[in-house]
Image (spheres, rainbow, N blue to C red):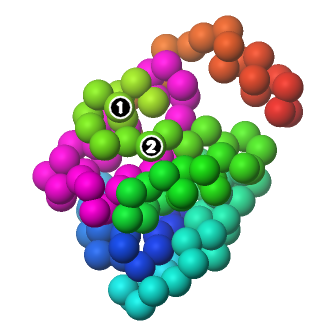
């Protein structure tokens, strides 16, 4: 699977760890930055990652920031993107299972690394169970 990554300075270290995590599991990663812990404006890196998912260049995306809130909001402005803020295994499972989330946002300042690994494993392995409301939204967006 090809997965887009984007983060601000607060999420940079986790982004680098996630890049290795995904590559080690055979996924192709498109890294949209940032490239350091120097302070940046998160939309500059979240928008290109979300656009790649919206335009079908990447199947899924992961964005990171301090809390993950702004990143999720920015990503969700793109047609066809369903970005869920995940802070636990349960939120990751439900995001895929019930909402067909094709992107997730993680708050690097609020989530420890072992939990991030569990979130990733769950989100990547959980199938969408279907639902009329999601299919209706996709028809309206399509």
37 versus 12 height, above or below? below
Q: Is residue 90 visible?
A: yes
Q: Quadrant of residue 17?
A: bottom left
Q: Nearer the viewer, residue 46 or 40?
A: 40
108 versus 45 height, above or below? above
Residue 78: % across, % down: 74, 50
Q: Is residue 18 visible?
A: no
Q: Quadrant of the C terminus?
A: top right
Residue 75: % across, % down: 63, 53
124 versus 44 height, above or below? above
Q: Circles 1 and 2: CB distance less than 8 Å?
A: yes
The residue lying furthest to the top in this view is 132
The residue lying furthest to the left in this view is 114
Q: Which residue is mark 1?
A: 91
What range of the chain is rendered magenta?
96-123
* Earlier sequence position, callout 1 versus callout 2: 2
Residue 81: % across, % down: 66, 43
Q: Nearer the viewer, residue 7 or 2?
A: 7
Q: Residue at x 44, y 43 (%)?
A: 85
The circle drawn on residue 75 is: none
Q: Residue at x 42, y 64 (%)?
A: 65
Q: Residue at x 49, y 19 (%)?
A: 98
Q: Residue at x 31, y 62 (%)?
A: 108
**In magenta segment, residue 108:** yes
Q: Is residue 85 left or right of residue 71?
A: left
77 versus 113 height, above or below? above
Q: Which residue is mark 2?
A: 85
Label 1: element kind: helix
Q: Is residue 19 left or right of residue 135?
A: left
């Amino acid at each position: 699977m090809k997965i887009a990554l984007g983060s601000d300075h607060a999420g940079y270290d986790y982004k680098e760890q996630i890049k290795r995590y995904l590559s080690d599991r055979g996924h192709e990663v498109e890294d949209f930055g940032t490239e350091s812990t120097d302070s940046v404006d998160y939309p500059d890196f979240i928008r290109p990652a979300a656009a790649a998912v919206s335009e079908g260049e990447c199947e899924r995306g992961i964005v990171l920031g301090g809390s993950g809130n702004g990143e999720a909001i920015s990503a969700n402005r793109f047609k066809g993107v369903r970005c869920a803020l995940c802070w636990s295994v349960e939120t990751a499972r439900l995001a895929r299972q019930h909402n067909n989330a094709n992107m997730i946002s993680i708050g690097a300042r609020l989530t420890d690394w072992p939990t991030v690994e569990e979130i990733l494993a769950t989100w990547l392995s959980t199938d969408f169970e279907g639902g009329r409301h999601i299919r209706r939204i996709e028809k309206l967006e399509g």
